[in-house]
Each structure stands twice: as C-alpha cells, then as structure tokens.
Image: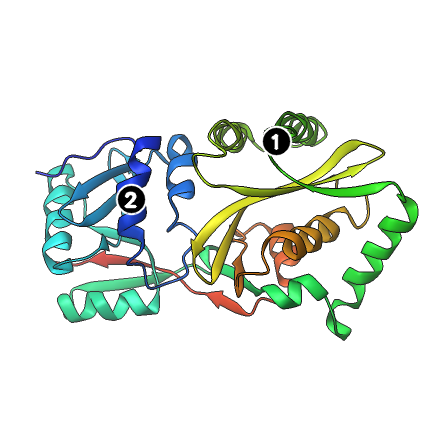
Amino acid sequence: MLCFKTPEIEDKIWIDECLKSVHSYNCEYTFGNIFLWKAAYRTAVCHYKDFMLCRWGKDDDVMYSVPIGKGDIKDAIEQLLLDSKSIGIPLRLYGVTLSYKSVLDSAFPNKFRYEFDDSMSDYIYDVQKMATLSGKKYHGKRNHITNFKKNNPNWSFEIIDNSNISDCIKLHTEWINNHEDDSDYSFEFEAVLSAFENYEKLNLVGGLIRVDGKAIAYTMGERHSDDLFVTHFEKAPADMQGAYPLINQEFTKNCLMNYKYVNREEDLGIDGLRKAKQSYYPEILLEKYLAVYEE
C-alpha cells in the first residue's frame, strides 16, 4: 500500500534526487511547482523505492504523474494501479510527453489510451532569442520596450532577494485588486506567498522592475535542469505598455543566460494568455497527454 502525503519543504532533498532522472521538459517536474501549488491541486507525494510518485485531486477525481526516478518503472506503475483501484477509479497519468508515452507503451503494450488537450501544452522558448528580441517578428516587442523606457526614464532592474520581497508581495496584491473580474486568485496568491516565504530554500530566482523607486513588475521561477529554466510567476500592470516584455527581457538577460531554454508553462485555454505566449514564438510547444489505463 502506497503512503501518499502532502509535500513539505523537507521533501525537496529526495524529490530533487528523483527529478534528476526526468527526460522531458515538463514544467510540473520541479519541486517548486509540486510544493507551491499543493493547496490548489491537492497534491500528494509518495517516496516509493527510488521513485517519486505524485497524485493530484481528491475523491474520484484523481490523476497521477508518471513515476519519476530510477528502477523498474513497470513495478512503480503497477503500484499506482493498485492505488487507483483502491479509490475505485481508472489510473490516469497526467503530463505524458511522447518520450514517456514510449516508456508506457513498452511496459504496458496496448493498455493506455491517450487524450490530448492543447491548453496543457508547455511553451518553451530559446533564451538567446528572448534576451535579444532580434528579428522582424519581435519588432512589436522592441517597440513596446522602447516606448516604456521613453515614458519611464527612471526605470531600473534588480534581482529579487530578501531586501525586496515585500515590494513584490505588495505589487502582486495591487495587481489582484486592479483586476475587477470574477476570477479567483486566492490559490495563486497563496502559492506566491509560499514561494517568497521559502524563497531561498526553494532556490528560486526572480527579477523586479522599478519606476521612480516603486516596484511595478516582477517575475520568478526555478531551475529545471542544466539547460532549462521554468518561469512560475510574472506580474505587471496591463495598462503600462511595455512592462511585460521589459521584465521578461531584463530577467532573461540578467539571470537566464546559462540556460538554453525557458519554459513559460501552459496557456490553460485562456485566450489572452494564449495570444501572449504565442506572440513570443515558442521554440518548442511541448505536447502533453493524459494516459488512461484500460483493463
């Protein structure tokens, strides 16, 4: 019987060790993503042999990750099958990329059915292109940044540390207050507060833009692997033209040049978010499938 538990900061050591074996660029395969969104997604983890098993949801609406780690993955999946049967649901594995699809099909031929939802695909960008924004297709981005600097000559960039975390929290609070829609930002804000509370323990990296000394935009994320960084949060005033492309470019230039790619996560089917992510022309649109085990 598997023993699932809510992830705690102390779990980072063994989970990071398991994550070293990941062979895809999924944004969810970082400890920060697992830990920070545990309330929103009712995340639970289990240390089974040398694998990390991850489960999301409750009652009969539960999904699992592909077992991440070293060893007999067929054995680990068979354990997930037993766990899902104990709940009374079919085994569903979330975020299955083509590389993991081949692993599943090899271990369980003709047993998994795959469902695709393009809103769950990860947008992965070339770091050099994000830093320079050179070329005709980024002409609009460069113009927005030029206009921002012209209208706000007293702007500055700084790396997030303990001295300016409170400014980021205040900025995020104002961003929520200025959004007069029906969206519930409580889970996201809880994740942000947890991120800043555990900023150093999670090895997060972030950047901040100020105008006349006031924080107006920030972004934050973490290392995925040697060549990939994952951006988890980014906030700027929508009515300040150029704020988003500027924080994106400055953070990339100052903090991400040792990476080849940056994963800016999914668009979740939100039209505005999809348009914004597509406007940066992803180098890779990482397709992820839901694998459903069929008896």
User: Where's the C terminus, which quadrant?
Assistant: bottom left
Residue 55 shows up from this direction: no
Quadrant of the rendering where the N terminus is positioned: top left
Residue at 79 percent across and 50 percent down: it is 242
User: Callout 1: 10 Å neighbours few (<14), some, many (20+)?
Assistant: few
Upstream in the sequence, badge 2 or badge 1?
2
Q: What residue would you read off at disc 1?
A: 182
Q: Quadrant of residue 238?
A: top right
Q: Is residue 6 above or below residue 113?
A: above
Residue in view at x 15 percent, y 54 percent: 77
Q: Which residue is mark 2?
A: 15
Q: Would residue 134 be seen by someone viewing this image from the given angle?
A: yes
- In the visual, does 164 lie left or right of 102? right
Circles 2 and 1 in contact, beta carbons < 8 Å:
no
SS for callout 2: helix
The kind of residue tagged 2 is: Ile
> At numbered mark 1, what does the secondary structure look like: helix, strand or loop?
loop
Along the horizontal axis of the image, is 30 left or right of 142? left
